Structure formats: structure tokens, C-alpha cells
Amino acid sequence: MTIKERTRAANRIIDAIADNGPRALYSAVSERKARLGLDRYSQVWYIDPFTGMRLYPFAGSTWLGFTGRRNTRDIVEALAKYSRDASPLDADFIASLLDGYSEEEKDQVRNQVVLTGAVMA
């Protein structure tokens, strides 16, 4: 898979999280979901759903403008690392970080995440 394809898969995972439960990674005010994007140098960026700011989503960055919780940040870091390096993702790891989601909602997200083909079941 290319970096563009992995970034698209990561955005499908963001969609699964944003469309279920308490809708982490979604802003009802601005009516937009978080996104991962690539610049012309193939750098992976996170676009915050509340502020629309572009952030460099890797450990050691300042994350100024990030509006999510720590668990959300961990999900974004994992997805960005997958996009950049093809680091394997685990659906159970992603589901375990979903604060405020019921077990049913976590299962729903987990199933949708597995369908993207980007994670280990």
C-alpha cells in the first residue's frame, strides 16, 4: 500500500470513530470530521475538526491547537504512524482508547475498523 492509500484507510477509521457513539473526532459546531492529510512532501498532517488547524501528529510535537483528549491523541498518533510507516494497527487497541463509548459502540467501531483492511482483527 502507498502512503496515500494508507492515509485514505486511516481516514476511513476516523470516519468509523466519528460516526458512532459520542462521535469523537467530529465537531457538530463546524460539522466536520478530523482528517489526516498529506502535503506535497508526503508529510502526514492532522486536521483538527474543531479549529481546522493543521497539526504535526507525532510524538515530540507541540500539538498546539489540538482539541481532543489524551486518548484521542493516542489514536491520532497511531493512525498517523500507520499512514507514514505502515506500522500495524490493532482494532482492540483503538477500541480500548474510545472514552465514553459503550461496549456495544466499541464493538461497532471495531467491526468497521477491521473492514478497512488497515488493522489486525
Image (tube, helix red, strand yellow):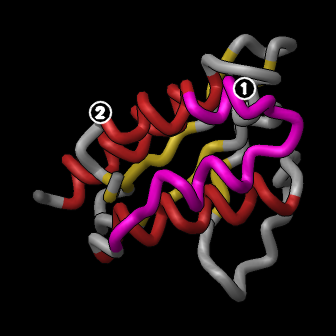
The x, y position of residue 110, in whole percent, is: 50, 38
Query: Residue at horizontal 71%, vertical 88%?
Result: 60
- On the image, which quarter does residue 62 sit in? bottom right
Q: For the residue carrying disc 2, how many other residues have a C-alpha within 10 Å: few (<14), some (14-19), or many (20+)?
A: some
- Could you tell me which secondary element the residue under label 1 belongs to? strand
Q: Residue furthest front?
A: 103
Residue 105 or 10: which is nearer the viewer?
105
Under mark 2, the amino acid is Leu
Query: Residue at horizontal 35%, vertical 52%?
Result: 121
Range of magenta residues: 88-107
Under mark 1, the amino acid is Tyr
> Which of the numbered marks, if any, corresponds to residue 79?
none
> Which of the numbered marks, if any, corresponds to residue 26?
1
Q: How far apart are marks 1 and 2 (CA)?
A: 21 Å
Does the segment drawn in magenta span residue 91?
yes
The x, y position of residue 29, in whole percent, is: 86, 13
Does the segment drawn in magenta span residue 40?
no
